Image (cartoon, rainbow, N blue to C red):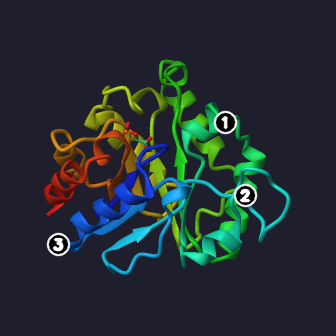
Amino acid sequence: MIICANFKANHTRKSTQKYLNELQSLQSKHQIMLFPPNTALMQNDFSHVSIGVQNFYPVQNGSFTGEIAKEQIDEFNIKCVLIGHSERRHILNENDELIKAKFDFAKKQNWEIIFCIGESLHVRKSGKDELFLYLQNQLNGIDLTYQNLIIAYEPVWAIGTGQVATKEDINEVLEFLKTLTKAPLLYGGSVNAKNVKETFSLPTCDGVLVGTASLEANKFKQIIQKAN
Ligand code: PGA
């Protein structure tokens, strides 16, 4: 399983270091990834936990106020990026063009990409055809055969709301995505230690992307243990 913690704008460098130390003792055959805020990026020497960036601007370096680019990412030997998270799409107004530019840039670096897609409640209520079309459009222009691609299905209405999608909801989307790509598929949206077992049990599911329930190392460890 691939189990990812997305800290968003939470945690400091000090608390991230403490968190990593708590994960150090963990024995896990699973692939664990941590996405701290940029101020807490660090080189990680534990082989079972990799650190990634939540965002980047798709250039080597340059005049892009407030952004970080490849030069800063390389400093920490980071090779893993999140692209297309719904908060960046909807709150920070990232459009498909920028998202695709980020994908192409990250692919050129051979970085591992967690590419997020997901529908709003409005789309979800429009029926299955609309839903699948919407998700497929979010993947337009993305090389679905890229070997370091992971896709995270995160319905917007389930992110940070405590409203987790049912296993049927998740499975039908992941089944659909499996017809488009061989990339591993994650589910994200109010995942926690109580509901994750059901998600892990889906044959289509290769892991989870966790926000709120990943913020405490203890709770995140419980999620990892459920995969064992
Ligand atoms: P959540 O966030 O677990 O708090 O719903 C998931 C995400 O945004 O990746």
Mark 1, Cα crowd under 10 Å, few <14 / some 14-19 / many 20+, is: few
Report x, y in % for residue 85.
Answer: 55, 44
**Mark 2 residue element:** loop
Amino acid beneath label 2: Tyr
Q: Name the residue at 61% across, 54% down.
A: 55
Q: Nearer the viewer, residue 59 or 29?
A: 59
Q: According to the image, label 1 marks what residue? A: 92
Mark 2, Cα crowd under 10 Å, few <14 / some 14-19 / many 20+, is: some
Q: According to the image, label 2 marks what residue? A: 57
Q: CA distance from mark 1 to mark 3?
A: 37 Å
**Mark 1 residue element:** loop
Question: Which dot, 3 or 2, sits closer to the camera?
Answer: 3
**Mark 3 residue element:** loop
Q: Name the residue at 29% across, 35% down.
A: 168
Q: According to the image, label 3 marks what residue? A: 25
The first of marks 3 and 2 along the sequence is 3
The first of marks 1 and 2 along the sequence is 2
Q: CA distance from mark 1 to mark 2?
A: 13 Å
